[in-house]
Every structure is written in C-alpha cells, then in structure tokens.
Image (cartoon, rainbow, N blue to C red):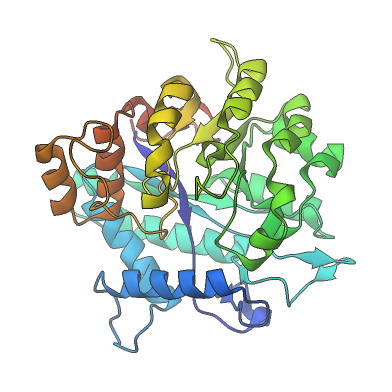
Amino acid sequence: MRIDIHCHAIGKGTDITKIDTEVYFNAEDNQHWFTRILYNVLEEDLTGMGRDSDRDGMISTDEYFKLLYRLLVSSEEIDCVVLLALDAVYKDDTVDVIKTDLWVSNKFLANKVRALNNLLQGESDLKERNKKFYLGASVNPNNPRAMQELEGVISNPDAVLIKWIPSAQHIDVQNVKDDFYRVLSAHNMPLLCHVGPEYSFPEGIRNKNKDDFRRLRKPLDLGVKVIAAHCASPVFPLIDPNVMADFHSLMEEYNTDDDVRLWADTSALSLSTRLPVISEIINTFPAKWLVHGTDFPIPIDGWPHLPLVTRNITPKEYLTILKTKNPFDRDVKIKRAHGFSDAILENAKKVLRLPSISIS
C-alpha cells in the first residue's frame, strides 16, 4: 500500500461561521508579500490542470476536491492519500479571526473523506475501488475544546494522524499539556508536525522559532510517534540555516532498529529551491526512517531536475518525468530518479493509525 501522507485540503470559503461545511480561506487581512505571490502561483498552477469548470479564473473548494479525486484515481504510483485538516489560531480561548488564514475543520474534512471514499467504491475498476482517502486531522491544543475535539477524531476510523504547523497555528509544542500527548500515545495516533522554514502562511513566516525540531522532544518523551515534515530541510539553502545534521542526531537518539519513534517525511522535496540539498538528504536520512509525502498543491515541477546535473538523473528519466502529467506520480518519479528508495512509499503503514482491515 503506497501512501502519500502529506496532501493539503484547501478551498475558497470566506465565511468563518461555516467551517463545518466549507473550507475557510482569507489571508487578505493578515497578508505577507511572499504568501501573496505564492497563492497566485498556486491558483495558476491548479487552474492549469484544467479543473476550473466554471471558468471564473479560480479553483473553488468543490473543484479542488474533484481534482484530488481524479488525481488519485488516475495515479499509477499512489494507492492512498492522507488529506490534511488545519485547525484555527486561538487567543484567549476564542478564534483569532485575523491570524486564522486557513481553517479546514475536522468535521468538514471527515465528511469529504467519507464522500470521496464512497465515490471510489462505485468505480468499476477493482484497483480504483481499492484506493482510499484518509483523514489527517488537526487539533490545536489551544482550542478550548481541544480534548473533546481530539476524542471525536480518535473515534473516526478514517483519522490516521494529527497535523500541526506550530508557527501558523501558534502552538508551543514544548509547553502543550501532558494529557494531550498521552491521549495521542495511548491511541497510537502519530503527530505530523511541520519543522523548519514555513513560507506558505503569513504567521509561519513571522513565527519561525515555533517550528524548531528540538521542540519535538516533549511529545517523543511522552510516547508519541512523530513525523517531522520536510526532513527539517531548508527551503532556500542560501537563506535558511541547514540543521539537517542536527535533526538526524535527534532521530538517532530516539530510533532503534526495532522501534522508530521519530520519522521524517519527504514532502515538498521536489521543489526546485531544494535541489542543492537533495543529495545531502538522501545521504543523511536512511530510507527506513522516511515516509512519502508530496505537500500538494505546492508545485511539483519536473523541468528543474536536469539530467546529468542533479543526482545523475539520466535523459531517459528526465523525459519520463516531463511526460508525467499526474503530479502525484511525477513527485514519485522525481524522487526515485534522485535515488530515494521506493521503500518510503510503503513505510507509512508502520506509523499511521490505519484501520485493522485495509487494502494490501
């Protein structure tokens, strides 16, 4: 079972009171110049995939989920996708509307995942029927109803992990109450936590210190399995500090051959800006500690991965990458050409809280 554990749910809702039935997205009251550019690039990239069915120049929430469905059904490399929720920012026990730029509620996404899986069950092809979407829930521990929300997530068999972006969600990982982590540990619910530079959210840019991988010690010490996103790699190697060696040392401290407690995912490693560090990532992190992720809809461009220049990619591999239209498949082929082991596609079943009965 080949799983993409890191795929974002996004949308175009603007009414924050309707988060149970729509994705809320509004960064205009909290915008940063970099994210303004990024969001325009993402919009153009998604529109270019031909899913702007009403031709209004943007991808609606409904259009985006139809795109995700089409991509999974047509994928030759991926069997399952974990769709990620994102809880709001909270201040003084209430939602901080200004600093909540994206809110994908667990209730909304759970319903979407269920609906998408029902559609898959109606496919005539057995391979397509065996594909599946999973819920990557998000519970901000600053939410005054965090424990109740967590209880609801745990009761959902589609929920396979908890997702945090500490900087964007104003989460102080090392000061979260022990009880929260103990519940995760007791129910084998892993924590997918962003570490390293965060440029996709205005608050992420402003609160980079919250994404320090060293803050993961507390959940690890309390028995939580943690997946650190992006291998703690720099996004812009000329600007961002390179702490991958230090992060690897932390992995060595918590992992043994028989028990891997601190994982790293390979999401957004196909970004052209990360080309200078891909070889270092492969040489630093053993495949047995890695899980596959795309970070879709972050662009997955094939053209920068030039043959004989980047990690000895051959002209044949390069042409195959360029001809691959499905971004899920393109991401796999890019990483495979660079030298990532296909084992990372299967490792997710070792860490996610998967249902006891699933496809094989």
The residue most toward the front is 238
Tell me the quarter of the picture where residue 54 sits.
bottom left
Residue 179 in the figure: left or right of residue 30: right
How far across and how far down the image is residue 238, in percent?
51, 47
* Side of 97 where 307 appears, left or right: left
Left or right: 1, with 245 as reference point: left
Q: Is residue 156 above or below residue 170?
A: above
Q: Residue at x 43, y 43 (%)?
A: 293
Name the image quarter holding the N terminus: top left
Image coordinates for residue 334, horizontal then vertical, percent = 27, 41
Residue extending farthest top: 257
Q: Quadrant of residue 261?
A: top right
217 relative to 103, above or below: above
Q: Is residue 61 left or right of residue 303?
A: right
- Tell which of 139 and 214 is nearer to you: 214
Question: 295 above or below 201?
Answer: above
Q: Is residue 147 visible?
A: yes
Residue 253 sits in quarter: top right
Q: Nearer the viewer, residue 153 or 192?
A: 192
Q: Position of residue 251 (x, y in %)?
A: 61, 23
